[in-house]
Image (tube, grey):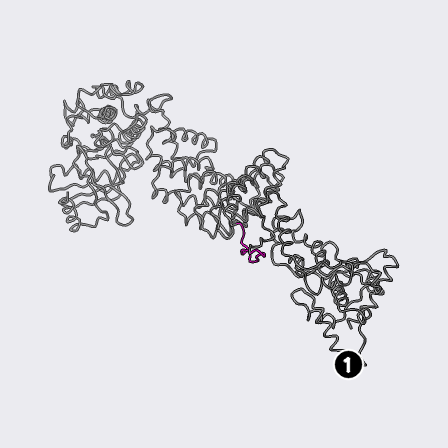
Amino acid sequence: MDFLKSAVASAISKGPAFPYTFGDRVDIDQSIWTLQNGTRREDGSKCSIFSFDVNANKSRLPLAKNALRKFRTFRHPGIVKVLDTVETDTYIYIATERIEPLGWKTRRKALSEESIKWGLHHVAKTLRFINDEGTSVHGSIRVSSIFTTESGEWKIGGLDVLSSMKEDDAIIYTYGSLVPDSGRYATPEVAKGGWDSIKRNPVSAVDAYNYGILISEVFNGGFSGTDQVGSTKGIPPNMQGNYKRLLHASPKARLSVGHFLEQGQRAGSFFDTPLIQLSEGIENLGLKSETERETFISELEAVAESDDFPEEFFKVKILPELLKSVEFGGGGPKVFALVLRIASKLSEDEYTSQITPVIIRLFGSPDRALRVCLLDNLPLMIDHLPQKVVNDKIFPQMVTGFTDLAPLVREQTVKAVLVIVSKLSDRVINGELLRYLAKTANDDQAGIRTNTTICLGKIARNLGANSRTKVLVAAFSRSLRDPFVHARNAGLMALAATSDLFSEDDCATKLLPAICPSLVDKEKIVRDQANKALDVYLTRIRKYGASLPDSILPPPTQTTATGEAVPRMSTPQNENSWTGWAISSFTNKLATASGQIEPSNGVAAAAATTSDRSASVPPALSRQIPLRPSVTSPTPSASTIPRVSSNLRSAPAIRSASQEFEAEEMEDFGDDWGAMDDTVDDVADAWAEPEPEPEPEPAPASSRATTAAISPQPTPTSVSKKAAYDDQGEPDFAGWLNAQAAAKKGLGSGSKALPKGLAKKSATLTTTAAAAKTVAARVVKAPVVGRPKAVEKEKKDEEDDWGEAWD
């Protein structure tokens, strides 16, 4: 084999240029030619090369030259297609389309009956052309002279003795006997009278007889000799009668191949098969009317579903014609669906070269029916399409379907996202794709909204970690408020399926509040699904909660008189009831209290409360809590101002500053929890950094007058002093008094007297009154409607007693 290749290469180097490369040798029987696979150097396309060595077989050189001449001049679709030829004194090369001998398949009986009929039909058409139109005789029809192409079609080769009957010196008369194994296939008249007898008989007689032997040979897997001639073994019943007429001993009574073809094409006859009809109709598919095309496609679908037909024919012959019909002939979605069915049998290289370019062009078509067909069949194509093609060429064309006016196109586009998402880049998924899905999530069609929710649930793991939670929480929460029952159900199903993608904090603070309203949905399927989703999230949250520590606070550091640690106020102490923590903390604090309880209705009680914090007061209540305007009553209220009467003996007991702070805390602290009907986003905003509190709205004129009479506004000097003695929320009353005393000593007799109520009273009372006044200055005032005159008188006295102190 290596010697042959080197000899061929040497011959080529010395002769004319032959732009083909020789490959592996192909076994061929009963031929004067050597057959090899080859490739074209220019583009690498496949071919076959017949080579004849002149020096090794000079006696048959006339046959090789005759074949070369006929290949060049005798062109027909049923004859092997010639690409190029080279003839020198030492060799003859004929490059043809890629073929293989028919004998490879017939010996293995690898052909179905339908495929054999289809092949015999092709050969019969070609022989009719040779005999009738070409008035020629092939003279060597047998299995060894028939080849199959890449499309599976049968084509005639072996043109060694092909002769025109118009020539007096036709080569068949002289060299017919030089054809290998010619005696076994010779007709009775040739065997008796030689090749010259052809002149006295019909032109088709020799080829008709040989065609009859070919029929027996392909159906039985070979030809044993003359004893097989006329045997109907293996021959289809509806073909046997005409088959015997082909092999009639008398050449004039013999049925011609043309008549045999006509008999077979009659309705219900042996050549009236779906595959043959298909091969006949595919060539002019673009010229058929719409009705004829639909009928033809229906027949083609029936043929394509059967395993009895050659796949090569559909891939190489049918597929290109269908692609032309889809792109240019108006084949439509039905033809394209058949294209994809046939294309599934292609190799990756074949698919990339033949199908992918067409798919890219079709996605740019404005035909809605074709777009829907493309989206429906996308699962059949996606595995064959490279990621770069999908991301850069198909998706940009596909997104037009998200905003199409036809709801069907929008819905199919949303469904197709599930198919192509694995081929899209992260940038496209988290950018352009999510923007379009946000639009379809608000579509006016309920089915499109539902499918968008399902789509998001299934592609959730393809979303980026940074945007996943925000997008899914917003989308699923919106779907739970959808008026369409199946949209709400889809949202709950998506939440249950994607529960592992959210953090435990998000599950507890964002998703559970969104799920809970669905527990009382009007539709039972929604309620049932809501309970399932709730169980999923509660199970996860409870498991997470069990793994958390009991507390993150530091251990207690206080000890009792006996040396035991004092329990924290909020820690239960071996109490089974829910009130155990409060009772335990309260009793433990009493154990550490010391000293005597002062009367609560005297001045000393007030002084003790403000000057020195008692150990009996819980630290949480004694701590200064900054006050702010109430959310529900922004108008200043005078009802919260502590009253200080000039007649201290007859006045009611004065509330301590700590009691005022406690009351204010209990009144306003509930505002921090937000409204009960807050959405997930509102609740989340409530825990962000607090915004500056708004200034109280000005009260009406009448209210301002009343308020001014009750509580005069402090001057800027007093405000600055207020800031100066503010010590972590505790008013520094003693410091203020010391400052007043120092000012008095510095001014001498010309200084102002102390405010009324402070000049003759004890330091304890003065401190208590100052604390009350500070509380009154910080508490937001509210208008007082219908206050009794006694109260107005009393407040006027307060103004007289305290007003000068702030100057």
Q: Which residue is mark 1?
A: 747
**What is the x, y in percent for residue 714?**
77, 69
Query: Residue at 54% across / 52% down in the picture?
Result: 551
**What is the x, y in percent for residue 598?**
73, 59
Q: Amino acid at mark 1?
A: Leu
Q: Does the rendering let one see residue 130? A: yes
**What is the x, y in percent for residue 208?**
24, 25
Between 334 and 17, the residue placed more toward the observer is 334
Between 765 and 719, the residue placed more toward the observer is 765
Question: In the displayed structure, would residue 227 be above or below residue 492?
Answer: above
Dot 1 surroundings within 10 Å: few (below 14), some, or many (20 or more)?
few
Q: Residue furthest right?
A: 789
Residue 411 falls inside the magenta stretch:
no
Horizontal side of 268 relative to 59 (left or right) equals right
Question: In the displayed structure, would residue 595 be above or below residue 50?
Answer: below
From the image, give the main secondary structure of the stretch colored magenta: loop
Between 774 and 682, the residue placed more toward the observer is 774
Residue 551 falls inside the magenta stretch:
yes
| Image: magenta residue range | 550-562
**If the image is split into quadrants, where does the C terminus sit?**
bottom right
Horizontal side of 505 relative to 122 (left or right) equals right
Query: Residue at 69% across / 68% down in the picture?
Result: 732
**If the image is split into quadrants, where does the N terminus sit?**
top left
Horizontal side of 48 relative to 489 (left or right) equals left
